DNA sequence: CTTGCAGTTTACCGACCGGTCAACTATCTT
DNA sequence: AAGATAGTTGACCGGTCGGTAAACTGCAAG
């Protein structure tokens, strides 16, 4: 009862996991509370609504991801190797999730964005915001690559959005086929989009 | 009461529209019936469950799309022009839907696949099946393009899946940003993936 | 000792969910 | 005319939904 935020944090974490594995509509407040070991009254003490909880859970999940992304996209790493590392990280994460849950779950932001963008403005906006942060990492890597003469794509921002869209599309393919093999094409596909031999990005 | 299938067809059509504009979980059987001018009892006379209706609605919607795709990907049209025509068709369709509904709705298969692939096997399978049919059109066009020496991508099947994944990713971006402008990059992005100047696919 | 506050618990609300059922109607067949 | 058949209707089911309200608990400051 003292520990300032254990309950709130547990709620955020469980909510994102359940929504990721199922969907927003299919997960009830009651279920989130049950798995978090919390009573519904406490839930509504911390969050005014299911939608608000979801937005908060998305932001909390971003903070977790951010640490990993900062490492993957470290300026210490050569620009194209950063992108290769991202591809590998995506594959590993999907593999781990599949082993944990038994099914390919894709990206939680894709699930939320696809399901709720037309229905819940707050969630739509948060999804767009977080996705924008992802593309910023790609854009920075591409800018560095261009400065070093490693790639000759036109606008780094546009190319970053293309790479990110491609990765989301493949992630959705993997989820829909409940099969990780489409992700094997993530790195080669990105290499092709950068006008490189697959080797370059795989280095 | 005589017209053999008017009710059933109306149900299929309304269901796909509502799910497209909202989501599977957010649309109730009652609401579908109301908008179709049908009572719930009749619904369950034609379909054993909401899930079965959805699968049938997906297939019915595919049949509509199939006609358009057969025209767009006609062997009469030069292979790369088919792909350009597809890009244009996607943009026009999204524009029309936005004008009709007020928001960018993306692709109904993306919405359904992202929301339900981990929860409803029948819907997941149908989504995968229909998406596979889409990529087949791309694959055929790419095979023709290679035969005519217009493109030099490696495996047409793999490239087809890449193009399709990219288009789905962009569609999701548009939905999440509630903005059609990301779709402007559909044709140039595909051209880049085919190793062409944007002009070639735009011809 | 007591007041106040953060957090928790329990019980409860009306609304709606997907789905069922038996009765009804209209048409075609014999 | 009688029956069979396809389609339709409205009433109803138990369960669950998101959300609310009030009482309670532990602890810290006055």
Image (tube, coloured by chain):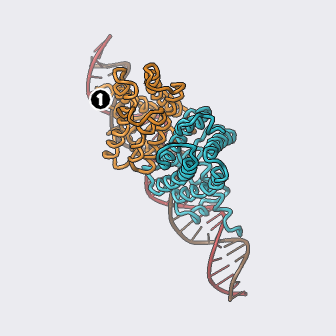
Chain colours: A orange, B cyan, C brown, D red
Q: Nearer the viewer, residue B27 or D24?
A: B27
Image quadrant holding the N terminus of chain B, namely: bottom right
Residue hosting label 1: A1
Answer whether residue A30 is visible to the viewer in this image: no
| Few, some or many residues within 10 Å of mark 1 (<14, 14–19, 20+) | few
**Which residue appears at 45% of the width and 22% of the height?**
A149
Answer whether residue B143 is visible to the viewer in this image: yes
- Rendering coords of residue A22 (x, y %): 42, 46
Badge 1 marks a residue whose secondary structure is loop
* Subunit ID for the residue under disc 1: A
For residue A138, side relative to residue B47 (left or right): left
**Which residue appears at 56% of the width and 45% of the height?**
B149
Q: Which quadrant of the view contains residue A150?
A: top left
Q: Is residue C27 above or below residue A136?
A: below
**Which residue appears at 46% of the width and 44% of the height?**
A172
For residue A186, side relative to residue B35 (left or right): left
- Rendering coords of residue A54 (x, y %): 45, 35
For residue A13, side relative to residue D7 (left or right): left
- Rendering coords of residue B39 (x, y %): 63, 59
Image quadrant holding the C terminus of chain B, namely: top right
- Rendering coords of residue B100 (x, y %): 69, 42
């Amino acid at each position: 009862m003292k520990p300032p935020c254990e309950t709130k944090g547990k709620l955020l974490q469980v909510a994102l996991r359940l929504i990721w594995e199922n969907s927003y509509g299919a997960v009830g407040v009651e279920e989130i509370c049950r798995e978090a070991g919390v009573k519904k009254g406490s839930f509504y003490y911390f969050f005014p609504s299911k939608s608000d909880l979801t937005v908060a859970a998305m932001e909390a999940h971003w903070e977790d991801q951010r640490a990993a992304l900062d490492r993957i996209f470290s300026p210490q790493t050569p620009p194209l190797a950063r992108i290769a590392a991202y591809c590998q990280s995506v594959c590993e994460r999907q593999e781990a999730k599949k082993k944990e849950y038994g099914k390919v779950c894709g990206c939680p932001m894709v699930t939320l964005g696809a399901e709720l963008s037309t229905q819940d403005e707050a969630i739509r906006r948060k999804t767009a915001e977080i996705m924008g942060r992802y593309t910023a990492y790609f854009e920075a890597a591409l800018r560095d690559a261009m400065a070093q003469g490693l790639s000759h794509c036109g606008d780094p921002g546009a190319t970053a959005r293309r790479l990110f869209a491609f990765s989301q599309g493949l992630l959705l393919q993997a989820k829909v086929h409940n099969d990780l093999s489409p992700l094997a094409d993530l790195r080669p596909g990105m290499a092709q989009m950068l006008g490189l031999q697959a080797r370059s990005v795989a280095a």
